[in-house]
Amino acid sequence: MKKSKVRVNSSRRNFLTGSASVAGLAATAAIVPITFATANHKDGSKGLPNFINWKNRDALIIHSDKGIETHRSAIGESIVTPNANVYIRNNMPTMTDAQIGNRKNWKISVSGVKNPKTFTLAQLQKLGHTTIATILQCSGNGRGFFAHKVRGSQWKTGAAACVLWTGVPVKAVVDACGGISSGAVFMTSSGVDHAPTGLDPKKAMVERSVPKKAYKDAILAWEMNGDPLPNSHGGPLRTITPGYFGINNVKHVGKLAFTETESDVKYMKSSYRISPIGKKGSQYPTCWEMPVKSWITRPTDETGTVKAGKVQIVGVAMGGTKKARSVKVSVDGGNSWKKAKFIGPDLGKFAWRQFALETTLSAGTYTLSSKASNGSNTQPELRMENRRGYAHNGWKDHSVKISVV
Amino acid sequence: AGCHVLKAAGAEGNVGPSLDSLKPTEAEVQDMVFYGLGVMPAYGEDEMLTKEQVDIVSFYVANSAGK
């Protein structure tokens, strides 16, 4: 795969030297896909794996049968990404209907609360009901732009989606359990999808701790864009932690605990750590809060010939854990910028906003870039170099070249 | 058994990607087996296999995947 030139953003490197407490600045990772850089991105002969044969093949780039990306132009023209177009990144095999059994009887235990309890899905549905829009984004989204050799799926922009989730607020569940125990610092969700594999839970269980404060926005979701949560996306029940990287949105969740310490499983302790190239360890920040980011979705080389004249440059902007406030667009690789307009409805601070800039382009070649701000932070020009290629939000790499005729 | 699909070896695991569809090169298998990734152990780095053993496994996988 063609890689861009190595560019080091030295002003951001100090993120890498901090403790996990600064993770919010950098955010961590998506689960390490067991795939290869040379997997064919656009090979039409690669069909969909059976467990997601309902997906829209034309919208997807198949890195492997476990790592499937959405084309830049297919993340949704109407804010929300259709389920058939949403990317797939699973650390463990998707649970089958047979393994799940009756969805209404799915169980989740809640501990680290005054009155620990176990609820079935049917019981959770009586505790509360809400819908939120969030960005689901793999920590490694943008890994394909890094110049050093990074193991894992070479995602560009398409390990991200904007999704409407329906479920019960975690706060309602906590209230039903008498409140959080004193001393709790983290909210820890555990997936039970490792169990059918027989692998050592410490190595295979997807168990993620996030700062306790995240519980106020979090939900336990059973519906995705109006459909029962597909097994491949963590059905029948998934923790949704708005503003946090994908890995923290634990699939097939069977345990929710308010804990004094972070989980000690591999996926928390050593995977998803944002470390300098050549270094690793649990002293580095984990992939938690997502940074401000944007990218252009059209026109691109995927969307056909661009004719000279009036052009709508369209994209998406996300603020991370804060609302996206503004977006600027450049047609000359970042030499000059114009403010774009937000279009479409505002689905809240955890969703992305669509933006558009109407401009006139004559025949020629252009480099289109976008740069979002959430009021506090603006996208940097360059990526933050790190070993596993996590949390990329530099605008330069996300630019697209187009030819206007 | 196992974590991957590799028909030639009778492996039908579903944790990592299907090696038969991925068809990795020998160098890619060597890299992954040596350093590991996610739930996959670092067989070389953690000295579960010698470099020679990693190379043998990698040669076999690269030459039998998809066959």
Image: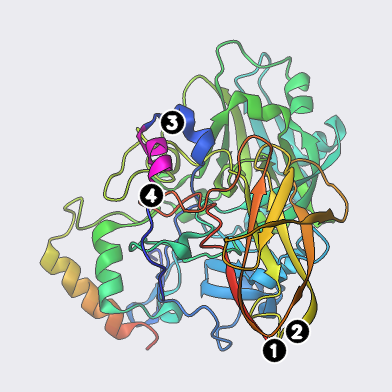
For disc 2, the neighbor class at 10 Å (few under 14, some 14 to 19, many from 20) is some
Q: Which residue is mark 1?
A: A405
User: Circle 4 — which element?
Assistant: loop
SS state under label 3? helix
> Quadrant of residue A54 in the image?
bottom right
* N-term-proximal mark, 1 vs 4: 4
The image quadrant of residue A248 is: top right
The kind of secondary structure the magenta stretch mainly shows is helix
Looking at the rendered structure, whether the residues under marks 1 and 3 are on a common chain is answered as yes
Q: Is residue A11 magenta?
A: yes
Real-space Cα distance between discs 2 and 3?
49 Å
For the residues labelled 2 and 4, the Cα–Cα distance comes to 40 Å
Residue underneath mark 4: A386
**Along the line of sight, the residue nearer the viewer: A224 or A111:** A224
Earlier sequence position, callout 2 versus callout 4:
2
The colour mode here is rainbow
Q: State which region is magenta.
A: A9-17
Left or right: A56 as drawn, with respect to A87: right
Answer yes or no: are tags 1 and 2 on the same subunit: yes
Which residue lies under the disc numbered 2?
A: A308
Find out whether the residues at labels 1 and 2 contact each other: C-beta distance under 8 Å.
yes
Check disc 1 and give the amino acid type: Val
Subunit bearing disc 4: A
Instruction: Label 2: state its secondary structure.
Output: loop
Looking at numbered disc 3 in the image, what kind of residue is underneath it?
Ala
